[in-house]
Amino acid sequence: MIAIRGAITVDSDTPEEIKGAVKDLLCSIKEKNNLSQDDVVCIMLSSTQDIHSFYPAKAAREAGFDGCALFSSAEPDIEGSLPLCIRVMLLCDGKFKPCHVYLRGAALLRKDLTSRLVVALDGPAGSGKSTAAKALAKHFNILYLDTGAMYRACALKCLGCGTPLDDGNAVKKVIDSIDLKIEYDCGRQVTILDGKDVSEEIRKPEVSSLASRVSAFPCVREKMVEMQRKIASSMSCVVDGRDIGTNVLPDCEHKFYITASTSVRANRRFLEEKAKGYETSLESVEADIIARDKRDTEREVAPLRKAKDAVLVDTSDMTEKQVLEYLVNKIQEKI
Ligand code: DC
């Protein structure tokens, strides 16, 4: 008899999510261990106490695993444990080396079985990459590193110091002494400049175009890229920016280039800025996006480009949910 372990997380406590997750997990275990239905003697499932809406054992039966004994139970509510998680143990006939399977956020439970997951998302402003990056990070329960925020903080620093952005030496002087820290509060990135949380301030439209200008300076990129590589080398994360797949993490296994038509991107940004209460017009947002695209793609150092091995995703006609599903499927094909 062989015991095979596995676990998976769900995004929310709904019958559909639970049925889908249990099916994915059991099918993956079956496939990776080359099992037939008859090999499985029993399946024991447990779920964290934030899962109430459906019995995982019933989900297993509905997924076709009905020729064996099935059982599910609730786990103790341990502080700090991974939420919305379903665990499983299969007892199987035979003698072989079991392949345990930990999917989605549960991959973090067994880092010895799963290598670190790092995903690179590049693309122009308004392409939907930061929305996708946040959703992906939440899905896999890993961190989201927004590298644009770092260039925005550099721009804010230069703005505060009254640094002329046509004077490379003046910019270098400011950036050499910048006190920038990236911290995480309940998974949310917090950008700290000179000891102050500037996460909101850096989102102002005037900072956007300054960030694009500041980010063209080699001294700025050198410093930011070093910080980004350090963060990405220490944990599983989704990193978004302009040069992640081409320059910051060229060896990253999961690379995507997210884009959309200029008018769709301008409209998205316009609605975002309006919702935040900024005085804006669609024409000025579109003009700013076109100018930023030009600067970001034409600068000499690490311009915005699709890496050769990145998957191109045009989100013009896709919903946020469709983008997430597409990215998750592509990533899962490789892990
Ligand atoms: O993604 P964002 O709009 O917050 O980025 C602001 C600017 O920072 C963007 O116009 C170009 C620059 N940037 C960059 O050059 N490289 C990155 N990896 C991220 C952003």
Image (cartoon, rainbow, N blue to C red):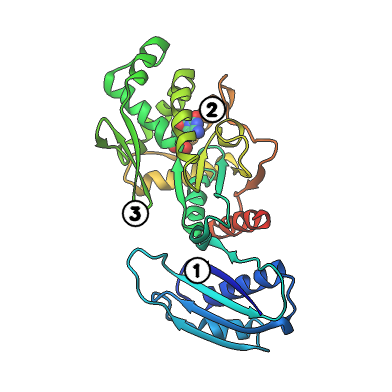
The residue that disc 1 covers is: 10
**Residue at position x 42%, y 30% in the image:** 151
Mark 1 CB lies closer than 8 A to ligand 1: no
What type is the residue that disc 2 sits on? Asp
Compared to 269, does 250 lie above or below? above
The quadrant of the picture occupied by the C terminus is bottom right
Q: Position of residue 10 (x, y in %)?
A: 50, 68
Which of the pair 226/129 is nearer the observer?
226
Task: Return the mark for residue 181.
Answer: none
Q: CA distance from mark 3 to mark 1?
A: 18 Å
Secondary structure of the residue carrying tag 1 is: loop
Determine whether the beta carbon of the residue marked 2 sits less than 8 angstroms from the nearest atom of ligand 1.
yes
Q: Position of residue 145 (x, y in %)?
A: 45, 43
Q: Across the whole image, how many numbered discs are drawn on residues?
A: 3
| Residue holding disc 2 | 296
What residue type is disc 3 on? Cys
Quick check: 260 above or below 7?
A: above
Sequence order check, earlier mark of 2 and 3: 3
Locate the N terminus by quadrant.
Answer: bottom right
Mark carried by residue 186: 3
